[in-house]
Image (cartoon, grey):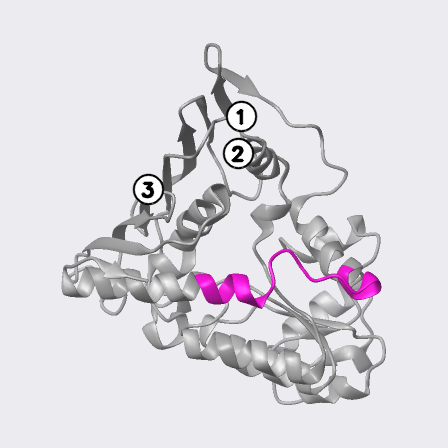
Amino acid sequence: QIIMPRFAECVHAKLTALVSGTPEKLKTFGEQYGVPESHRYSYETFDRIIDNPDVDIVYVITPNSLHRTFTERAAKAGKHVMCEKPMANTVADCEAMIAACQKAGRKLMIGYRSRFQAHNIEAIKLVRDGALGPVRTVVSDHGFTIGDPKQWRLNKALAGGGSLMDIGIYSLNSARYLTGEEPVAVNAMESTDRSDPRFREVEDIINFQLLFPSGATANCVSAYSVNCNRYRVSGPKGWVEIDPATSYQGQAMRAQLGGPPASREPAPQAKNQFSAQLDHLSECILTGREPIVGGDEGLKDLRVIEAIYRAAREGRTVKL
């Protein structure tokens, strides 16, 4: 209900097929969006898309542990792939996904929708244009109060981890795209109540710090028991903050740039972040360009995530 309605705003992308393990969902959404029965697939019949010329891109929105499998199957069927974040549960899986798409000559894009959202685009532009001076600090906090203990996000085999894999990845990714650098060292500390039935297998809170080559630092929060969605990037000339930063809607920006702090509103977008993301991959296919958030972007996040978990587990700084 979040993504499919956004195809109506797309210029280059349209919904042509559906895949689900639930026949009732296929029928309901197939009828709602005008997808014929011949273009509705189960997980078992998915590979038949190789014979469907109406499908150019497969958008993988399964539990994390299935991202690699369906990316490889889609590439083998000759389809380009958009895969939700996190790209996969491990660095090795990310590397295999990239290799599969390269072998098939197909593009791979990761669903970092915030890169297509107006306020986030404006924040990146301000940093790149030098409005803040050299970035010195980033503070990025992302969390929400998770519910049903039986959901797949709290199953380590399916999710790969807890809040860090799901919502904390926004803290990490924003620190990377705001600085424009890759971290060289990480520290981390976990706080999880294992008596809570939600957290028998995965972490709740994990706080982590990143050090970048320029000397910039990022202090980040990831949580499944705290509601937060914000970041601030600061330099000697000022700062920019967005709160909420990476939510589906409602972003609000404030900045202090040589004067008193004030609200700042970017130019209106023609497209919602979801439709802009969907159209971007289509445009890349049509023009031969590479996505701004390709498979390498997902791989870089997973490399840091593995280091964050190691730093928390071993109680030490992990260098990258």
Q: Is residue 21 visible?
A: no
Mark on residue 217?
A: 3
Q: Residues within 10 Å of mark 3 (few under 14, many from 20)?
A: many
Image quarter of the N terminus = bottom right
Helix, strand or loop at mark 2: helix
Question: Which amino acid, mark 2?
Answer: Val
Given the current orientation, which residue lies at the most extreme top position? 260
Residue lying at 54% horizontally and 66% vertically, measured from the top left? 296
Question: Which amino acid, mark 3?
Answer: Thr
Specify whether 198 is left or right of 110: left
Q: Earlier in the sequence, mark 1 or mark 3?
A: 1
Residue lying at 76% horizontally and 55% vertically, measured from the top left? 279
| Residue 287, x across and y down, in percent | 82, 61
Q: Earlier in the sequence, mark 3 or mark 2?
A: 2
Quick check: 84 above or below 115? below
Mark on residue 127?
A: 2
Quick check: 153 above or below 42? above
Mark on residue 141?
A: none
